[in-house]
Image (tube, grey):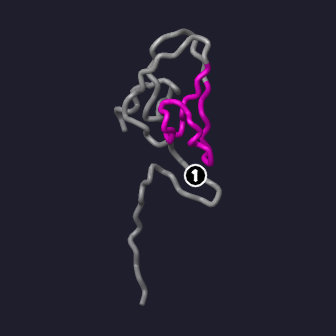
Amino acid sequence: MREHFTAFTIELTSVKKEKEGFIMSEPKVAQKAPYAVTVEKGKEYHYCTCGLSKNQPFCDGSHKGTDFKPLAFTADETKEVHLCGCKHTSNPPFCDGTHRKL
């Protein structure tokens, strides 16, 4: 007896488990809004680019085993900034409104 299957796609935030880690074609959307945070002049920050961090919008190392790396940046002044929550901005780490199109 021959079985036929219809092709289908399961989207799991584009994450596929492999032997040695994860393959992620796109970052996970952490939230569809920016994170308003106050940064301090001269301080270095590590912005999460994968969307897996439990310490959003900053990296907690959850990207290990993926091809994603945190984005290091240093604040040029002390002020409130809006960091991208959807991880699809064209101006990382800052929000550019892309979350409205997702």
Q: Is residue 80 inside the magenta stretch? A: no
Q: Is residue 49 left or right of residue 100?
A: right
Label 1: element kind = strand
- Residue 8 versus residue 38 in the image, above or below: below
Residue 74 percent coordinates (x, y): 60, 18
Q: In this figure, what is the number of numbered marks?
A: 1
| Quadrant in the rendering for residue 85 | top left
Q: In the rendered view of the protein, which quadrant contains the N terminus?
A: bottom left
| Amino acid type, residue under disc 1 in the picture | Ile
| Quadrant in the rendering for residue 69 | top right
Segment tinted magenta in the rendering: 44-72
Residue at coordinates 41% horizontally, 67% vertically from top-left? Answer: 7
Q: In the rendered view of the protein, which quadrant contains the C terminus?
A: top left
Q: Is residue 66 inside the magenta stretch? A: yes
Crowding around mark 1 (Cα neighbors within 10 Å: few <14, some 14 to 19, many 20+) is some
**Is 70 or 90 nearer to us in this picture?**
70
Residue at coordinates 62% horizontally, 48% vertically from top-left? Answer: 65
- Residue 60 versus residue 22 in the image, above or below: above
Residue at coordinates 45% horizontally, 20% vertically from top-left? Answer: 37
Residue located beneath label 1 in the image: 23
Residue at coordinates 37% horizontally, 34% vertically from top-left? Answer: 32
- Residue 10 versus residue 52 in the image, above or below: below
> Majority secondary structure of the magenta segment?
loop
Residue 70 percent coordinates (x, y): 60, 33
Residue 42 percent coordinates (x, y): 61, 12
Residue extending furthest toward the left: 100
